[in-house]
Amino acid sequence: MDPHGQGEAQGWFQALPSPRTIPVPCSWNDLFDDAHTYVGLAWYRIEVWVPSGWRGRRVILRVGSATYAARVWVNGSLVTEHLGGNLPFAVEITQQLAWERANVIAIAVENEPKPERVPPGPPPGGGGVLGVAAGFPGTTYDFFPYSGLHRQVWLCAVPAVHIDDITVVTTIEGGDGIVNLKVATVGAEAGTGKARLDGIEADLVFRAGMAEATLRVPGARLWSPQDPYLYRLTVTLTDQARVVDIYALDIGIRTVAVRGDQILLNGQPIKLTGFGKHEDFALSGRGLNLPVWIRDYELLRWIGANSYRTSHYPYPEEVMQLADQRGVLVINEIPAVGLNMADSQQLTEQRLMQSQSQLRELIARDKNHPSTIMWCVANEPVARAPNDEVPLSPALKQTAIDAGTQFFRRVYDEAHRLDGTRPVTLVGVGGGPREWHKPFDVICINRYYGWYGGLGGRLDQAAAALARDLDELHQSFARPIIITEFGTDALPGTHSLPPEMWSEEYQVEFLRRYLDVAAQRPFMAGMHVWAFADFRTVQGVGRAGSMNYKGVFTRDRRPKMAALFLRSRWVGA
Ligand code: GCB
């Protein structure tokens, strides 16, 4: 740990004064007591031998995610920097490497809660979100600010002339699937290639490193939750009749569209059942934990969920591939949580830049996943006084709302410019400005009547308030509506009759009311319970044991009564 930022001047990118061993990927917070609440600068260092069989290729260092800001050195040279805690970055390091001897790779990572970041740090003097007033460590969101190298770090070698990117867009014509491809190369200004899928072939002719092709798949097997069929697409790059690179990608042929108040998958209306989730587990924190993910997909199937949202940041690529394979629909969200539009114009502008760059990186990474059916540009932005002590004056409130209107219009436009094939949404908070939803294709809302905000314990009134709210939203927008969060904390093993807050029975009754209200409204396009599993958050009086207990599974994935209830609703078992 380098709390005073002296490592760079002292050459820690070569040697660390008092190193300890840490696994990658993993958060550092649950491993070492002195790092438990530490979110400042820390250094990772490793020595690697690069096989001389890689000579002549370009060697790339790829970091799956470093939360939040990273700087990377190879053999003492700074090779790249990256901002944003949940998306990959890569850099070519061929020039900095030495063959047949140890190479030193060092990555300095920090997760300081700075106000210009996305998610932003709390305002000076505190922060506090919902019931977690002035939590520690201070955040603008309700989950633990786990820090470190959270995903795999790879060294890989690619041919000097190689396939750099493939964009796949699928449409349906009658029974045929149409697969449109764009292929980008590095190093191949001209040249040819082939795209193959299921015995169907198209020629690629590169100009300025780019080629396009269309494959028609007669009688295509369409990708859907019921039949998540994936075709293997293989792209070959040829340079003067020699194959120089091959890339294979599993793709699904499907369409997503919004028509009136419905979301259509392959032209058919779908209703989302599922959850908001987190990447969170004991000890590994937010580090990639594949056993947990396999278990989670098993449990999603068991409970009858067809979808989830990547609240409140992009999840690992392995997890998106699993969603493709298992037919799970994903609302894919950037880490824009905790935005307050009443903060200064300068901060808002900086956050807009950050949101847009994370959106670009996310869409570049996940554009080819059939499972991603929608992009989400923010969770619960607000327009309120810092620390919420004194309400904003009406004039300041209006200025903040207007700032938000512009902000969200711009991120919406950017999302559609980058990907014209998927709907884009914003997740709104209860009581938040409705006009912010205006540009979006789907209205997503989080609602907690019967938990926060005065109706605790009064589920009849809560259900009535919810019904009014949904009807009004439907009237104003006539677009698909999804409740992306609703739920209550249930302490595992706490029971009460009649149901009272914090008990497992209350969680079941609350979910039942909400599902009933939605079931009576054919315009509802989906219901995502908050949350899939209990998760770690910051210390504070609103969160017993530093946990958010709104999971229908415990943190170690045991079912609460609510899990059995949802299974009975969604599977009928
Ligand atoms: C919300 C937030 C989510 C919180 C949840 C809660 O509205 O989007 O991050 O964890 O409420 O439990 O309060």
Image: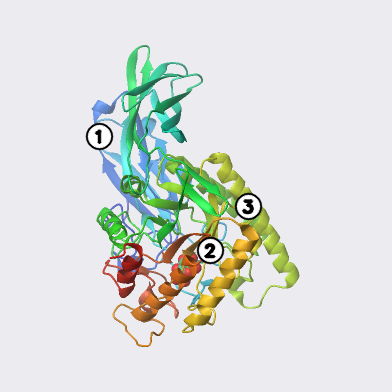
Element under label 3? Answer: loop
Among the 4 quarters of the image, the one containing residue 216 = top left
Q: Nearer the viewer, residue 118 or 12?
A: 118
The disc labelled 3 sits on which kind of residue? Pro
Q: Earlier in the sequence, mark 1 or mark 2?
A: 1
The disc labelled 2 sits on which kind of residue? Ile
Q: Earlier in the sequence, mark 3 or mark 1?
A: 1
Q: Examine the rendered structure and indicate whether residue 558 appears above or below residue 202.
A: below
Residue most extreme to the right: 395
User: Which residue is identified by label 1?
Assistant: 101
Element under label 1? Answer: loop
User: Which residue is identified by label 2?
Assistant: 445
Total numbered labels:
3
Mark 2 residue's CB less than 8 Å from ligand 1: no
Residue most extreme to the top: 240
* Residue 138 makes an appearance in the image: no
Tell me how the rendering is colored. Answer: rainbow
Residue at 36%, 69% (x, y): give it: 551
State the image coordinates of residue 371 (x, y, percent, origin top left): 40, 46
